[in-house]
Image: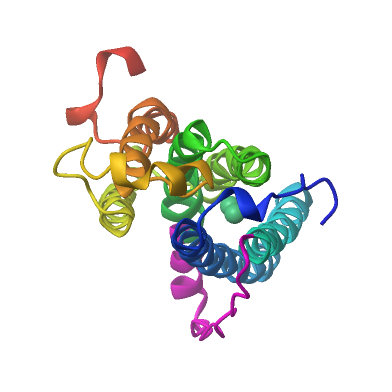
């Protein structure tokens, strides 16, 4: 794959490679799901006459997500495993405009402004432990793109809520909380942030750290980036605003 560093398979045990490959496979599935969501989003934005700049940006994000799938597949292949891309059961597109607008808002705000922004912390944490050049490269490529995806969620989300009152914007908050909780649980919320770190050292070098490391990264990005972003968008309730957010 273009730009990917070579990988020395002999330097790692089959067991470490297999564990890491499973991590990369599950990331591939998430990336493929993101690709599908964004492809649908392009259609929704067009249907609601979104500014061209948002439609084009969503289109290029869909290509970036498709590239993330290829990157994950490449890493797993270099680790010595052929990964299968399971078919995605497409979500049903709502027929009426009101329900469709609701789906679009959810994807932009809970999906992009929250989940994609949170993922940045997880990827950064994984990259900080990774030592294999191939893993560092792959995580760096994905991380760079995800930073932009979160920013897109904020900009397009503000456009989608442009006629909303302050009170109505805050009605998006429960969906954001649900997304944060689901994301943390999927990553495996750590009871002890240092649990099982030692036994996973080799796997972490291949870009697949213990869930505690990823979770700590997700929580960091929630505090640093997600909540300030939601505050700027007017989604964060006044009652839980932090002094630093202004
Ligand atoms: Fe992605
Ligand atoms: Fe993304």
6 or 117: nearer the viewer: 6
Q: Taking the image as drawn, is residue 85 in sight?
A: yes
Quadrant position of residue 193: top left
What residue lies at 37% left-to-right and 43% top-to-bottom? 214
Instruction: Tell me: 113 left or right of 223.
Output: right
What residue lies at 69% left-to-right and 54% top-to-bottom? 61
Ligand 1 falls in quadrant = bottom right
Instruction: Tell me: 163 left or right of 82.
Output: left
- Relative height, residue 56 to residue 195 (above, below): below
Q: Position of residue 184 (x, y in %)?
A: 29, 50
What residue lies at 20% left-to-right and 41% top-to-bottom? 195
Total label count? Answer: 0
5 or 27: nearer the viewer: 5
149 or 123: nearer the viewer: 123
Quadrant position of residue 217: top left
Please identify the dominant SS of the magenta region: loop
Q: Position of residue 183 (x, y in %)?
A: 33, 54
Q: Position of residue 86 (x, y in %)?
A: 55, 82
- Relative height, residue 104 to residue 138 (above, below): below
Q: Say whether residue 227 is magenta.
A: no
Indicate the quadrant containing the N terminus: top left, top right, bottom left or bottom right.
bottom right
Outermost residue toward the right in this view:
2
For the record, the magenta segment spans: 79-106
Q: Say whether residue 87 is magenta.
A: yes
Indicate the quadrant containing the C terminus: top left, top right, bottom left or bottom right.
top left
Instruction: Tell me: 65 left or right of 231.
Output: right
Q: Taking the image as drawn, is residue 167 in sight?
A: no
Q: Position of residue 97 (x, y in %)?
A: 52, 75
Scheme of colours in the image: rainbow
């Amino acid at each position: 794959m273009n730009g990917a560093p070579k990988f020395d398979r002999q330097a790692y045990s089959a067991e470490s490679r297999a564990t890491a490959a499973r991590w990369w496979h599950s990331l591939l599935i998430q990336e493929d799901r993101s690709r599908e969501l964004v492809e649908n989003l392009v259609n929704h934005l067009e249907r609601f006459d979104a500014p061209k700049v948002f439609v084009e940006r969503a289109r290029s994000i869909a290509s970036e997500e498709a590239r993330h799938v290829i990157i994950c597949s490449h890493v797993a292949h270099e680790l010595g495993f052929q990964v299968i891309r399971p078919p995605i059961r497409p979500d049903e597109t709502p027929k009426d405009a009101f329900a469709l607008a609701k789906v679009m808002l959810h994807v932009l705000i809970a999906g992009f402004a929250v989940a994609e922004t949170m993922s940045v912390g997880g990827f950064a944490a994984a990259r900080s432990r990774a030592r294999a050049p191939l893993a560092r490269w792959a995580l760096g490529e994905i991380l760079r793109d995800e930073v932009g995806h979160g920013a897109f969620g904020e900009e397009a989300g503000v456009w989608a809520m442009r006629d909303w009152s302050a009170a109505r914007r805050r009605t998006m908050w429960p969906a954001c909380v649900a997304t944060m909780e689901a994301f943390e649980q999927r990553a495996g919320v750590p009871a002890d942030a240092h649990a099982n770190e030692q036994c996973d050292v080799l796997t972490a070098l291949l870009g697949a750290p213990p869930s505690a490391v990823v979770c700590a990264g997700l929580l960091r990005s929630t505090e640093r980036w997600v909540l300030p972003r939601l505050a700027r968008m007017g989604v964060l309730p006044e009652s839980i605003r932090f002094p630093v957010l202004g």
